[in-house]
Amino acid sequence: MVNVLNSSYIYIPFLYFLKTRLNSKFNKVAWLFTYFIPLFILTFFSDSLSSLLSFFISIIIVNYAYEDGYIYNDAITTINEKKPTLRLPISSIVDIRNNYKKIVVTRFLIATFLLFVIYIISGIKEFLVSLSLYVVINVIYIIYNNTRSILNLYLILPLSFFRFYGPLFVVLPIYNYNLYILPCILLYPLSKFLEFSSRERFKIKLATRLINDFNYFRLLYYFVTSVLFSILFFFDSKYFPFLLTSLFYFLYRILGVLILKKDKAAMELIKNNHKKHSK
């Protein structure tokens, strides 16, 4: 049996996420359409590609920090849970627990190297924003993983925001930050927050009643945001990147609903995923 310390998925960016969260082709494709493509659209049309390499490295750093939270949750948080979700074999979980400090130090050194590369190729601003994202995501995830209350729901907003749009702010000029913060929250983090609020463990009855089908909720949500950004674009062309990204999400959700109607296996997979995380 291979010791987890010698396993590449513990150290190479994205591999832990792929192994433990995106364990089906359907989930991998869905992640491509909900994360990478919208982020690229938003960044490309915001004229923020002066530092393309920094943008890609910042995506790695942000998701590397997110994986730190996943590893802590899967190996450490589960110790105190009565019915934990085991995403790895017991032997691997035990290995991570026994070697957790070594894993953390190694991953920190890898993240430090990536941050150093950003500093060399771009400068202090991109370095500081990337460093801030790495630190903030880790801190929020530590709080999230050690809390089992309504606070978990509210922490979804910053976690989603920094993961989905943090890389954009690395390359975005500081004077544009105010314009982008609220629209970016509307594009995904708010939707995620509302979906999470409907989970049984938070006991928000209104949300549970209103959001009983995630697929149709997302369809309605992005219809509303597309209308909203269309109106804003009518008055100010600066909102074009948000309109385009919202329309992409809306068309993707339409396509998703149509496919799921024909693909019973995919529909069943989504229902099982929702049930798994509902409590």
Image (cartoon, grey):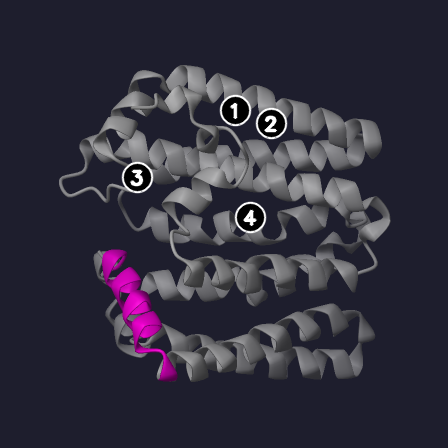
The furthest residue to the right: 50
Magenta stretch?
262-278
Residue found at x 49% / y 33%: 138
Image: 223 above or below 132: below
Tell me how far mark 2 sits from mark 3, CA to CA: 26 Å
205 with respect to 174 (left or right): left
Mark 2 is surrounded, within 10 Å at the Cα level, by few (under 14), some (14 to 19) or many (20 or more) other residues, namely many
**Callout in the foreground (2, 3):** 2
Tell me how far mark 4 sits from mark 3, CA to CA: 20 Å
Cβ–Cβ under 8 Å for marks 1 and 2:
yes
**Quadrant in the picture for residue 69:** top left
**Callout in the foreground (3, 1):** 1
Residue found at x 69% / y 83%: 231
Camera-nearest residue between 169 and 40: 40
Q: Which residue is mark 4?
A: 163
Residue 77: % across, % down = 28, 33
218 with respect to 261 (left or right): right
Who comes first in sequence, dot 2 or dot 3? Answer: 2
Q: Amino acid at mark 4?
A: Arg
Q: Which residue is mark 1?
A: 107
Residue found at x 35% / y 47%: 151
Q: Describe the element under mark 2 as helix, strand or loop.
A: helix
Which quadrant: the N terminus? top left
Q: Amino acid at mark 1?
A: Arg
Q: Describe the element under mark 4 as helix, strand or loop.
A: helix
